[in-house]
Amino acid sequence: MQRHYLHGPWQREIGGRQVDYVTVPGSYRPVGACTLGYDFASDWADAGDDTLFLVTEGVMAGASFTLNGQPVGEAGPWAPYRFPLPAGLLRADNTLTAEVRDIQEEFGTTPGRRYEAGLFRDIYLERRPAIQITNVAFRAVLNDACTAAEVTVQVENAGEGAGDVTAVLTERDGYRVATAVAPAGSPLTFSVLRPHLWSPATPCLYTLTVTLGADTVTETVGFRRLEVRGRDFYLNNTRLVLKGVCRHEFTSRHGYTPTEEEIRRELALIKHAGFNYVRLVHSPQSPLVPRLAAEIGLLVTEEPGTCWHNLDLPAVAARARETLRRVVLRDRNLPSILAWYLYNECPPSIPYARDAAAMCRELDPGCLVSTADSSGDDTLLRAMADAASFDFYGINQYSGAQDYVERAKGFPDKPLVFTEWGGWLGQGNARALQLYADTFARHVQPDAEPRMAGCTFWAWADYEEFSRGLPSSPDGWTVEGLLDKDGNPKPDLQTLSLMCFAMDHPAPVYAPPVEVLLRQPRRLEAWHPVPLDMEADGQSALKEAVARMRARFTFRNPAVGAALVAGIPFLPRETDGLAPLLLGAGCDEVVIPVNREVRAVAVLGHVALRGGYPNNAVWSVYHPDQEAVTPFGAPAAAYTFVFEDGEEEIPLAHGIHVLRANDICRWWLTDPRAPETAPALRTVLHPTYESLRFDLWEHAFPTPRRLKEIRWRLADPGAILALLAVSVETCPTL
């Protein structure tokens, strides 16, 4: 294969008159339509039996090519096109023209993003033998243990009388791993034992060399096993969390024609920051990008340039599919390709999604397919995902941090990736961005509910954009990136880098300490803790009710163990942290067996997790629902002490015997006191939402009596009361 690059200054004409020169490859601001012309000499006029092609790797948004006055071909946007040249058309001296159309094209523009025009990627003449390789598809299927792979290489060719095709797989150092030979048109197959696996951590690559007669094609390939298991991705049998960022093709310095040095440095910085995935938005990018990503260890997704288009329009859908088809053929052999996205923020179209997904799977069997949807219609998105057999959900969302958690609850059947987040809501505000980062780092953990499979920050770098305005785009620049317009990192990059680290290495969650408020030496009386290991009816439902009250926040219950409070030993009820007995709707009585001769009873609890005094009648940081005001002295509960020789009942009233457990009420820290109890234990479950307190209540009997049980009964159906521990005095003071 030989190439003659047609790079350099091209003459630009508008309306039949020359206006200037433009650099090819290169991009310029849209002009609507123009003619680009290039004169060049060639010594390929007599090509013999070889075939000549005109190849363009990318135009915006459409171009009609003419060589020496004869039409050669029509190129669509973004993707590579190869046009065969008729014999004798190429001369010693030649004129190549391109009628370039830009912003007026129905498909090929990217609304809302920097848009330019021109022949922005390589354009060249290519000389190939008459019998030539036109396409190579590499497919490696690894066994369950990833210790062996069955490889199929499908080779397409043109030309009559083709013989055998040879495929040679080598490691990057030149070591030959496998060789296969088959007649042209037949698949080549071979096995590879113990292949070096490709992953972001170990980006091991191989070179596949395919030869047919005098023609040779090389492909960069790798071995990996990419799967979806439930709500998670797995790469080589290891759970994969996508730590992503959205990258545009253009740069402020070189527009849509960045240099290899620029691309390589940018991808290396993304990798260095801790990301393992780059969403290539919103159109096909340079073929260098996924190749360099494979080299340094980054997963990428690609999309066809569908951005805010109506995909129910046949002409738009057809051009989108064609662009995607060409990009899949270009990059499908690279191990860096995670998935093909069918569109970005277009109105969902089930017919388009179904057809485009089927095409991707036919060209690249086993590939992942999804979209980056922003419709907000979850019912329609799920229906489209089912119709097109999406492998995962991709959603663009810009909202509060907790909204991502709530949204994730609606997608429990497949992995969910927030394909865009951030924007002006998170960028430039350290506290807000940290809240987002903490939320994502927490909900990608394997035990998280709901669980996310990854996220992709918008965006990697600031970019020029008009008509959006504040707060996103002051002075024609969208400043939502992690790099400024000069390519310098912003402080936000460190926050996102630490988020990526926390996704793989979550910080240990320490149980909050429990403070004993009544510290006294142990009393001389014989006090004994009463075991509270009974299973009372309705406890699970009450626990769930308390959990729902705390659903907006992350709590970790403390563990107390044996505690000495006011000189009395207690053994608080615990199951994975504090687990008080609960009294409330659905469980209006709890019976506590004692069966001892007692003189006195001491109880840790006497608090209300819901309701109680003092209370509030509006939404608070603790309770998401409105509560009725609980007046002072209102009935709360009652104790009935059941003795062998009779019973004694003691009513418990709000504000006198029972207080609200959370010392934070509405927006203030409170310190409620009850005349019949004393603050005994306090623990801070969340520094701004719940300071949990238990009180000590003591009651002495006139004479020692054998206490069979304590019956704790509810009197306020709107409250949830808590009892943590009980201790009894069993003998007279010495």
Image (cartoon, helix red, strand yellow):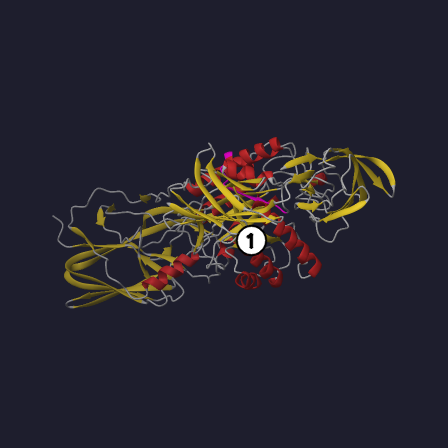
Q: Position of residue 147 (x, y in %)?
A: 37, 45
In the image, residue 11 above or below residue 162: above
Check disc 1 and report its element: helix, strand or loop: helix
Locate the N terminus by quadrant.
top right
Q: Nearer the viewer, residue 98 or 107?
A: 98
Q: Nearer the viewer, residue 178 or 608?
A: 178
- Indicate the quadrant where residue 224 lies: top left
Q: Position of residue 489 (x, y in %)?
A: 58, 33
**In this rendering, would 662 be left or right of 301?**
left
Identify which residue is drawn at 69% across, 57% down.
Answer: 316
- Indicate the quadrant where residue 721 lies: bottom left
Q: Nearer the viewer, residue 441 or 121?
A: 121
Seen as rendered, the residue at the extreme left is 734
Q: Position of residue 437 (x, y in %)?
A: 50, 43
Q: Which residue is mark 1?
A: 363
Residue 273 lies in the magenta-colored region: yes
Q: Is residue 653 visible?
A: yes
* Magenta span of residues: 272-282
